[in-house]
Each structure stands twice: as structure tokens, then as C-alpha cells.
Amino acid sequence: MTEATGSGTGRTEGTTRTSANTAGAVTSAVTGTVPYTVPQAPVTIDPAIWPSIATVPTSLKARVAGRAADAIFKAAVRSLPLAVRYPDGTVLGKASLGLASLGQAPGGTAYPVMTINRPEAFAARLGDGGLIGLGESYMAGDWDADDLTAVMEVFAARVGTLVPEPLQKLRGLYLPRQPRKERNTEKNTRSNISRHYDLSNELFASFLDSTMTYSSALFPESGDALRTVAWDGLAAAQQAKIDRLLDKAGVKEGTRVLEIGTGWGELALRAAARGATVYSVTLSSEQQELARQRVADAGYADAVTIELKDYRAVEGEYDAVVSVEMIEAVGFEYWATYFQTIERVLAPGGKVAIQAITIAHDRLMATRTSYTWVHKYIFPGGVIPSVRAIEDITEKQTGLRVRERLAMGEHYAQTLRLWEERFMGRAEEVGAMGFDAIFQRMWLFYLCYSRAGFETGYLDVQQIVLDSAFTSSASSKTASAKGAAAAKGAAA
């Protein structure tokens, strides 16, 4: 993905390609906890590919805001369980106190280490772009971490209090808003989806399991055992997640299934294996191509149709509607349209099963119009819903009702851990595809940033089952009538 245009792949060609075999390890004298080597940002970065990364902002705003951001950052981290190290030997965070001067907490527990390589550039980017600048400065190599997820967890756990409250109230005047061209209108949505999902099927295959499933798995393990699940169990856990959704939607032989968001076809394959007919829509041409190939190879071409179509354009009637982690790409102002579309095509007595990443409602309301690093580099136009928002919208603007929920955020944290380790373990292959060191640092930041959200509970992921309030009411009345008739018969 070229940062300037949101198209392309962030690849370099020919002799300018930077692969992971030129990278150096990011480690800590105390911890060194990640099982891979992080690519170092090159000294010279191509401004045609990465304009915001190649040049440190030098505007008056960046200089003034940079000094303020530097002061706010240093004040915030002084009380955090971190070791923030500067080139002059300064250490901030709880690691600067007592035994922690060695980077250790009481009892010998290691604090995660954040190393500021270029303080001036870090401050300027942070001042110019806020959290966008935090991510961009990591991509540029202005700072590193011995364990990036652990560092991001510290920030994620305190995201609502890191910036003083009076300054938080001014965020709407200072921070950028989502560009109009990234709003999820029918005109823009194809481009938004393409910028992420059309990067390269080979890129996604480098870190996904054999099912090519790009959403949270559902492992059989729980508690401490969940934190050590291994790669060889991921494919089965992905299929278990899909099977649970299909079960909740009542998918069986003869069921007419609508899938909103195809992915690479695994859900459609498993529904077809049950004897269902599947109509699946996607806006990713890369996903459509590979999903169709997988369906054909499995012998289900007659049962599965995969079309390049916006969900709003779907027609017909379906007994079951399933959608896995697609609502996040719909956009805040279109959630009602999404559920109204589902209601419109749902057959009487039909069921809906969706999987959705969720956020606390107060954080949704505080950030729903913000333009973040994730929007700029990963998911343009995306907004993560809250459970309350889903329930409010379906109750007030549709006849659908939420009937059941399963929260499984801890499973997403481990899914992301496995993806992260797989991606970084194949860094040399990714480099050979043409994805340079800046892209790899960007993708690592995305995976670790996301994992930290689930580890701390800032994010969750839910399987949500819905049906029609009117269908349920009718069923309830029928059941009551049958019960009354049975009682009358028994009395007679």
C-alpha cells in the first residue's frame, strides 16, 4: 500500500528492494522477548512510496506541537510500567526508580523497553499527527521496542487518561477527521476495501493458516492454556469459529445462505459441505478470484456463487445471513443501512449470525469521527462498533433483535499472536515479494497494536445472533396457543 495514494502495495522494485535479511534484531539487555528479528528502517526512505515516513514534519505546527507533545509524553510515561530509554542515557517510566533502573519491576519482572532512537523526530511526528505520528515514527525507526505488543498494551490500558482531560476536549479541533473520499458510500467503498484486501493474496497467505481465514479463531482452550496455543491448532480453531456461526444461523441441507464479506471462501465452503446453497458478496477482486478457485477445487461450484457486489445491492431472500468481521468496514453512518439490508433479504423465520470486533460505547462515541493511523495505513473508512450501538440501531431502526452473544476477545489476542509470529518468521519471503522494511514495520505495528487492544480488553470480538422480533413474537404466540390447547386437552 503506498501511503500517498492508498493504492499499490508499498513495494520496491529491482535493486531498491529492502528485504528482511538486511535487518537487525531489536532486543533488550533485560528481556529480548520476541522470537523474531524486526527489520530496521533504511537510512534513506523512498518519498514516492512513503512520503510521511521519508520526511520529518518541520512546519510551525509540528515544531510547536512537537514541544508540547514531548512534554505530555514524558509526563505520561513517568508513572507507566515501562522503561523508556533515550540516547543520552535517560530512562523514564517506573523503570527509572530503584531496582527498576535495570529495567525490572519489584520481584524481578521485566518492564517492556521502548527505545527512543531519534527524540526530535519522534516528538515532531507525535506533535504533528498524534497517534498517527506514534505509528509513523515506529515505521520510520524513530523508536523501537523489545516487545512491541507489551509496550502497546501499556498505552492501550490507559488510552483514556494518557492525555490530560482538558486537552482531550480539544481533540476535535486539532486532530484530523476522516477524508470525505474515505466515507463508505457505494462509490468509495470498493476503493477502501481494495486498499487492504487487494494488497496480495500471497502476502496474506504468508501469515494465515491453510483455511485462509482472516478473523478471530475460537480455540478449545481457555484460561492460561489459551495463552500458549500453537500454530498447528489454528486451522481447526478457525473452522470451529465458522461452524459455530453456521450452527447459530441454522445452516443445514437446503438452507439458502447469504454471506456478506467472502474472505477467501472458507465459510462458503463449510456451508456448502452441509448441503446449503451460498450467495456470497465481496468488494475485493483478489479475494473473489482465490475464493472462486477454492470453491471450484472443492467441487462446490454449483452450490456457491461469489460476486463482486456491495452489500446494499443484494436482492433475493435467504434463510440465513452470516457476516464475519465485515461490519467494521461499513462505517458509523451506514450501520443502520447494513442491518436494514439484512432485514430486507431475511426470509420469515430466518436467522442472522455475525462476528464483530467491538469497543466500549464511550470510546466509540469519543473516537467515531477520528482519523487514526489504522485508517491511514490499514483500514480506510473503518469504525469499530459497540454492542450497545448494534442493539440500539437494530431495535430502533429495524425489526431485528439481538438474541445471543459470545464474547471471545482473548481468542483474538492469541490469533493475532500466531499471525504476528508467522508473519515475522517469514519476513524474508515477504521481502522477496517486494514488501519493503517500512511495510513490514507497518504490518508488525498493526498486528501488535491490534493484539494489545484485545489483551487489555480495550477491544473485544463477539459472535452475535439476531432474528426478527416479529418472527419471534409469532413463534411465541404459536407456542402459547399450542400450550393452551394441550392444557385444555389434558383438563378434558
Image: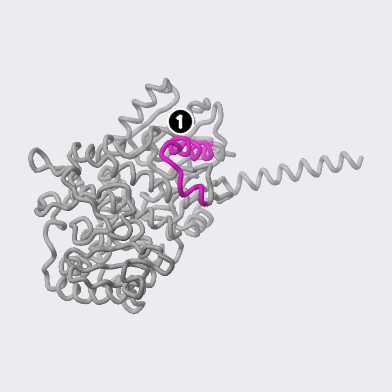
Amino acid type of the residue that numbered disc 1 sits on in the rendered structure: Val
Direction bottom: furthest residue: 166
**Nearer the observer, 465 or 81:** 81
Q: How is the image coloured?
A: one colour
Rendered position, 48 above or below 319: below
Residue 43: image location, x then y, percent:
10, 54
Residue behind mark 1: 278
Residue 18: image location, x then y, percent:
14, 44
**Residue 243 belongs to magenta span:** yes
Rendered position, 339 above or below 254: below
Main SS of the magenta segment?
helix
Q: Residue at x 51, y 53 (%)?
A: 394
Quadrant into which the C terminus falls: top right
**Nearer the observer, 274 or 184:** 274
**Nearer the observer, 387 or 86:** 86
Q: Residue at x 42, y 69 (%)?
A: 106
Q: Is residue 8 visible?
A: no
Residue 321: image location, x then y, percent:
49, 39
Residue 378: image location, x then y, percent:
28, 50
Direction right: furthest residue: 492
Question: Quarter of the image holding residue 12?
Answer: top left
Q: What's drawn in magenta, residue-wise?
A: 224-246
Q: Residue at x 34, y 60 (%)?
A: 152
Question: Quarter of the image holding residue 191?
Answer: top left
Circle 1 packing at 10 Å, graded few (<14), some (14-19), many (20+), is many
